[in-house]
Image: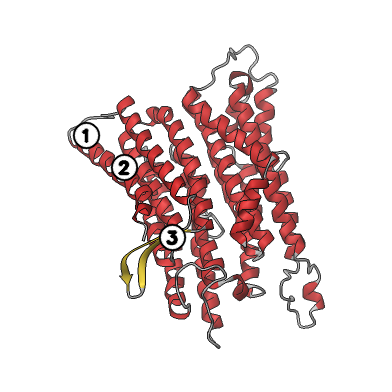
Amino acid sequence: MDIKLLIPILVPIAAGAILLSGSFADHLKGKKDAGSGRGLHGAVMTALSFSVLAALYLAWTGERSLTLFPLVEEIPLYFRIDGISRFFVTVVSVIWLLTGVYSLVYMRHEGDEKRYYGFYLVLYGVLVGLDFSGNLVTMYLCYELMTLVSFPLVLHNGTREAIMAALKYLFYSMCGAYCGLFGIFILNRYADSLTFTAGGTLHCAAGQERILLIAVFAMLIGFGAKAGMFPLHAWLPAAHPVAPSPASAVLSAIIVKSGVLAVIRVVYEIVGPEFLRGTWVQYAWMTLTLLTVFMGSLLAYREKVFKKRLAYSTVSQVSYILFGLSLLSDQGMQGALLHVAGHAVMKSGLFLVAGVFLYRFGYTRVEQLTGMGKKMPVTMWCYTIFSLGLIGIPPTVGFISKWRLAEGALAQGGIFGALGAGEGTIPAGEIGIFSWLGPVVLLLSALMTAGYLLPVTMKGFFPGGEREGEDLKREEPSLCMLIPLLILAALTLILGIAPGPLESFIGKIIR
């Protein structure tokens, strides 16, 4: 039993709770923004940096586990570090720390810094607990707590639009959570254990396949809600535009990945991919993911509000990951996990760039960004790198991840499997029409992604006559906002130029 596992969970939660209590006390006294400044920023970054270092140290120094107490009979509150935990907590920690640095300047624009940083720290502790969860019930508790703690970040500015978006986020999240809980009840009846185990723990009793498939499909829909998968995706384009930009960045880069993590745990470590392979659940799941990929890209292409365009993009891009997982193959999972890391880096960077434009000029719409390449060349170059990565153009990490996803689909063949199987069934290990439909949809989505991201770059650097005579002197943001962008842009390129170490690590997880 390794009690040290609680350090990166409890320290940020305790620090955040202290800030929230101080914020509440300030509001009771009628003070506004009390405590903001260097003292607050120093305390926040100290607590966050310590927690991130503790989480990474514990994750990368061997296998660890901790059983606290039984929640219900034979189901304890259980934490354990494995390969998946190590991967996700690293992605979460890197993005959380960089976005936290960015927030030091940006949140002066939003106000109520104590409250924001309080929930920001608590949320990081909850996410570490989610990543370190060792069984399905512990993960579910952290998953629900994550929803409740991230909810205030959406309604931070207190406008009517923010309140309605936050309520929408809460409603969709709760609908998804109930679907997940239904599945947990069923799996608890038929699985040998709810502890995460490679290959799964489900041994289906004869005649129970139908209810188990229904339960698993309900969990895919439920946990897919957080990942923005159709039909429970509508909260995402509503919540992202109204949240502060650093909150939008972590919502889009990290919070949606909690749904991905939950799907991985259920499909690959409780149910087992063999149980789902070739069933109606797999084909329905692939259909929903590809529908979401196409729909999200199309809506993003038509959207004129910049942050809302990026939110629709997230709807599409996260379903790339879910499509890779739905292939139920090692190659598909490798592409999915590569895109988890790549998308987290690129999409957080894009939302932080949007925050720069909003913070410095108050620009929220795409047409307002004309000529920004001359005012903010470094920022616009970072935006361009993130955009190229999201499209999937080499040498960015987005090209590698999308290549692996397409490769994973094509490798399973069976293009005419449904016709050649005699009775209309697809042979085991083949996915029929999806083996080529998947890459086709991904390619169409990539073209639409280029259509809604690259015009910002083109008009940013080549504005034409729209801003002739306007003062276009350079106005780059402060270093606290610029350095995270430069690091994220560098990661987008480094992970694309030298993906070997990351692919090797993912390969070890899969095996």
Left or right of residue 45: residue 399:
right
x, y percent for residue 444: 73, 50
Percent from the top left, x then y, of residue 163? 37, 45
Q: Residue at x 79, y 79 (%)?
A: 421
**Mark sitting on residue 16:** 2
For residue 255, above or below residue 426? above
The amino acid marked with disc number 1 is: Asp
Q: Residue, x 50% and y 74% (percent of image)?
A: 215
Q: Left or right of 41: which side holds 496?
A: right
Checking the image for residue 80, the label placed there is 3
Q: Is residue 281 visible?
A: yes
Displayed quadrant of residue 462: top right
Determine whether 221 is above or below 474 in the image. Answer: below
Mark nearer the N terminus (3 vs 1): 1
Q: In x, y percent, where is residue 158?
A: 35, 39
Residue assigned mark 1: 26
Q: Are the residues tagged 2 and 3 within 8 Å (C-beta)?
A: no
Q: Which of the two marks, 2 or 3, is nearer to us in this view?
A: 3
